[in-house]
Amino acid sequence: MRIQKKHNFLLVSILFLVLFSMTPAIYCDSDEYEMGIDENGIIVWEVIDADEDQIEYLLSVAELDEDDFDYEEEDEIKYEINSITEVSDEEYYIISYDEYENDEDQGTKAEKIAMDPGELAEDLEDFELDDYSITFVLTDTEDYIDEVGDDVSDTYKPFVYTSGSSVILNGSVGSFLFWLKMDYDKHGILEEILLVYDGQEIFNMEQKSYTKSNRLPLIWIIIIFLLIIGAIITIVIALIVVLTKHAKKKKPKKVPTPSEPSVIAEPEQLEKTQIVSEDEAKKKPKKTQFCSNCGAERDTDSAYCTYCGSKF
């Protein structure tokens, strides 16, 4: 009976303290199961039903503050996943994300997912869900969940069991039974959480969407920025080198200046020069000739030698 009372109290505590307070958690890799979500994933849940009066009663029984569970119908909870880090020696992954409630930033938080389904089963039994997440599980989802159910000890099987891709917790508060079902999608993300108390649904939240963000991790933004800067510097240097070589090839060679500039004669001057040359040619002395008979100098204007009378 003592175990039953402790079990009932802590089941309520699980719902209101752990699931929605989003305390830090961790996750690990294995050869059998894999992470089904990616960095930059965006997950949105919407509150479909919330019976505030019944929830307030359960909170009072569990001795919890109402601020630990302040959800109303049509509220939206969004996670923007920043990073998924493997911690292989400890066998978990750390999932870091930014949480938003109705677009209001709730800060950066983290959760962990147990590599071994038996670790999650042990958490469910010992009600120490601050250690491992129940918002995320590994994939293949149904196999993982099924193994969680198999690993629950016989003592707790009436209170903690699994069905398909769902984990189910049940117990009693006062004289009424409550039933809490957590269903997961193929990515291992909480798809629906349903709380039934005294045969009536008092809380229901469903996954609205799972998409991938277009934003890049900060490290990739830095790397791309440095690559762009490097490319610009390289192009500028290459242009300077090419333009410098081109300018050297086009530089005109220095031509020596003649001591006296050539003067091109006008046509009239050429004609005058030609006439003068002809006159000078006429004035040239004729070649001296001698008589072949007596050897006296010949008078070129006479047909006979003036000394011997010989005819030329």
Image (tube, helix red, strand yellow):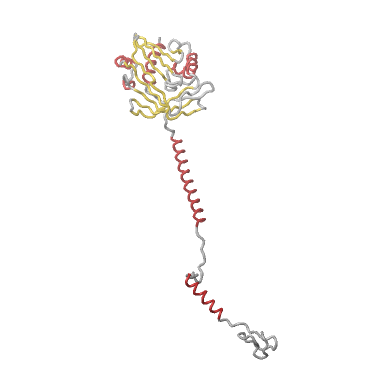
Residue 152, given in percent of the width and then of the height, sits at 47, 14
Residue 224, given in percent of the width and then of the height, sits at 46, 38
Residue 160, given in percent of the width and then of the height, sits at 44, 13
The quadrant of the rendering that contains the N terminus is top left
The relative height of residue 276 versus residue 169 in the rendered view (above or below) is below
Which quadrant of the view contains residue 10? top left
Give me the residue at 44% from left, 40% from top. 225
Most extreme residue toward the right is: 293
Which quadrant of the view contains residue 40? top left
Most extreme residue toward the bottom is: 307
The quadrant of the rendering that contains the C terminus is bottom right
The relative height of residue 300 versus residue 1 in the rendered view (above or below) is below
Most extreme residue toward the left is: 53
**Nearest to the observer: residue 80 or residue 97:** 80
Numbered marks: total: 0
Residue 71, given in percent of the width and then of the height, sits at 32, 20
